[in-house]
Image (cartoon, grey):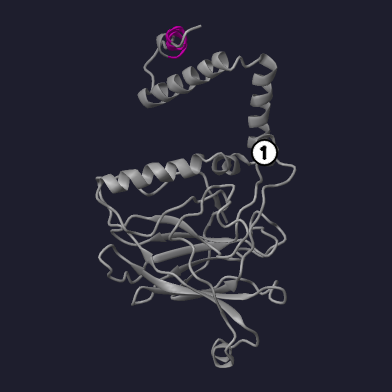
Amino acid sequence: MTHNDIDTLVKSWIVDAADRPAHPRVQAIVLRLVGDLCKAMEDLDIQPAEFWTGLDFLANAGAAHELGLLAPGLGLERFMDIRADEAEAKAGLQGGTPRTIEGPLYVAGAPASEGFARLDDGSESAQAEVLFMQGTVYDQQGKPLPGAKVEVWHANLMGNYSFFDQSQSSFNLRRTIYADAQGRYQFRSIMPKGYGCPPDGSTQHLLDLLGRHGQRPAHIHFFISAEGQRQLTTQINIDGDAYLWDDFAFASREGLVPAVTHVSDAAAIAAKDLQQPFASIDFDFHLYPETAAAPTSQIERNRAAA
């Protein structure tokens, strides 16, 4: 069949067969996606067994809650970021902190504090390097934003996240920090580790077939928001990680790899009430003003809450 033949056939199924008013947006999207899939089936001579295998794969990935992992692994979440960057540039918004993917592991409702928070529950203190991270939240003109909301979450030394990993305490390595009167935030935590896709999961199975690994570098996630500003979804990567520029989720970006200072000065250690050296990261966030000229930065999606 020609592509024109397929377009005519799919239109008869999706549009002409409607016997009541359709949702225009849903109809247009389904028409396009089914048409493109049919064209791929024709062009690639996809056999029935291959089709049903693919459908089973998606069903299994959904049942295992891995579709949120599959999307970044195939570059789809990064592609949405590229489109959002283009929309903001078209609206004249440039020079702010780069966005990057949210991933599937955010949990709403983390305990809140002002200015400072300790993220870790101390369960890995003996094995971990203590991390202090601090900075200021600014608007596009460089003015500090007092009360800016800094939501932060990251993995433990096993590369696992609380809530999804039931062995961890509630909200371990997750907090909400409201910036102080000078727009500053700071937290104490542990240096995170990267993680890999579940080795027996759907995502890693597909990546294996594609000849790809499923590893992520160590990183820390953020939602940054303030009144009158566009929400920033981003993450910083830990410099020196073996997968820093080889992230299976394609989330590494220039501007999101701050320097890590390893502090061994006795006076500095004592000032932090510690007995061992620690790591320190300075990182400021620069937000864009809210504007009707760009699509909303508030992304609606199903997220975990506790």
* Residue drawn at (41%, 13%) of the image: 15
- Please identify the quadrant where the C terminus is shown: bottom right
Q: Amino acid at mark 1?
A: Gly
Q: Is residue 236 visible?
A: yes
Question: Can you identify the residue that label 1 sits on?
Answer: 211
Residue 30 or 17: which is nearer the viewer? Answer: 30
Q: Is residue 295 visible?
A: no
The magenta segment is 4-14
Residue 292 or 73: which is nearer the viewer? Answer: 73
Whether the magenta-drawn stretch holds residue 205 is answered as no
Q: Is residue 177 above or below residue 12?
A: below
Locate residue 246 relative to residue 178 in the image: left or right.
right
Judged from the image, the secondary structure of the residue bearing numbered disc 1 is loop
Q: Would you identify the image quadrant in which residue 162 lies? A: bottom right
**Residue 12 image position (x, y, % from top left):** 44, 8
In the rendered image, the residue lying farthest to the right is 200
**Residue 41 image position (x, y, % from top left):** 57, 16
* Residue drawn at (49%, 19%) of the image: 34
In the rendered image, the residue lying farthest to the bottom is 267
Q: Would you identify the image quadrant in which residue 155 lies? A: bottom right
Q: Would you identify the image quadrant in which residue 99 lies? A: bottom left
Secondary structure mostly seen in magenta is helix
**Residue 248 image position (x, y, % from top left):** 59, 47
User: What is the crowding at mark 1: few (fewer than 14 residues within 10 Å), some, or many (at least 20)?
Assistant: few
